[in-house]
Amino acid sequence: MTYQAEIRVWRGDMTGGGFATYQVEADEGEVVLDLVHRLQATQAPDLAVRWNCKAGKCGSCSAEINGRPRLLCMTRMSALPPGEPVTITPLRAFPVIRDLVTDVSFNYTKAREIPSFAAPQGLAPGEYRMSQEDVNRSQEFRKCIECYLCQDTCHVVRDHEENKSAFAGPRYLMRIAELDMHPLDTADRQKAAQEVHGLGYCNITKCCTDVCPEGIRITDNALIPLKERVADRKYDPLVWLGSKITRRR
């Protein structure tokens, strides 16, 4: 069934902008990205928007739909309130380049700040061995498509620009947690998480988990366990004593 949908799209650049309203033809079963493409083809050929796979696997088409961070290609029109305008805006946490395209280089900077996997000395690639239980523990985090919706919805990043220099955000704290769980990794992830990447800024509101299109339980399975290990290391006297004995040996 074909119908007319009203779409309000933010148009502009870093100097400013506003909303433009369009009437776009829609068909049953379509997603928001379908209507954005039709809008480009029929009324707004200069509309800037990122997209690639249209299958929810590349993370390119991140935007905010009716105020909620979502993937344009995974948000069905039928899931939105019927008869109401669909409002599409760029990710609010990052600088706008043009229209729906934002500068997400903040995330690339944070990714480069995390040291890569540090294998034990004398162990060559191909000689790594770990139990299936250890594999399963971090496998969930590898589903991340780096859409940065969790980064966008995290209020520490979204509402406080001054925090960005000291806070890696949920996506990269999850990466640190994944490496810290690896039984062969030798880097001191816990100290860096707290002192360099701002783990203490996170107050576990679970907003990052709520918007993850891959259903990764970022807060429960990565951030909270990492916080617990950091707290144990700093405040648990038995853990502190064990670390001193290990270091002496």
Image (cartoon, rainbow, N blue to C red):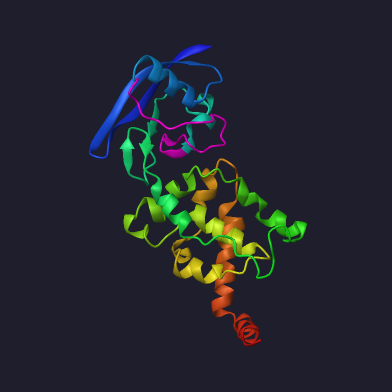
Q: What residue is at 57 percent from the left and 76 percent from the top?
A: 233
Q: What residue is at 49 percent from the left and 28 percent from the top?
A: 80
**Residue at the limit of the structure toward the left, as seen here:** 15
114 and 94: which is toward the camera: 114
Report whether residue 83 is seen: no
Main secondary-structure element of the magenta-colored stretch: loop
Q: Position of residue 10 (x, y in %)?
A: 32, 31
Report whether residue 113 is seen: yes
Q: Is residue 77 left or right of residue 249?
A: left
Quarter containing the N terminus: top right
Check residue 56 for magenta coloring: yes
Q: What residue is at 35 percent from the left and 26 percent from the top?
A: 47
**Residue at the limit of the structure toward the top, as seen here:** 1
Q: Position of residue 4 (x, y in %)?
A: 43, 14
Check residue 233 for magenta coloring: no
Quarter containing the C terminus: bottom right
207 and 95: which is toward the camera: 95
Q: What residue is at 44 percent from the left and 21 percent from the top?
A: 37
State which quadrant residue 136 falls in: bottom right
Q: Position of residue 63 (x, y in %)?
A: 43, 36
When the figure is inspected, residue 160 is found, relative to residue 59, above or below; the finding is: below
When the figure is inspected, residue 238 is found, relative to residue 93, above or below; the finding is: below
Q: Is residue 77 left or right of residue 14?
A: right
Q: Is residue 29 left or right of residue 156?
A: right
Question: For the magenta stretch, what is the residue range?
Answer: 45-69
When the figure is inspected, residue 85 is found, relative to residue 59, above or below; the finding is: above
| Total numbered labels placed on residues in the image | 0
Q: Position of residue 76 (x, y in %)?
A: 53, 27
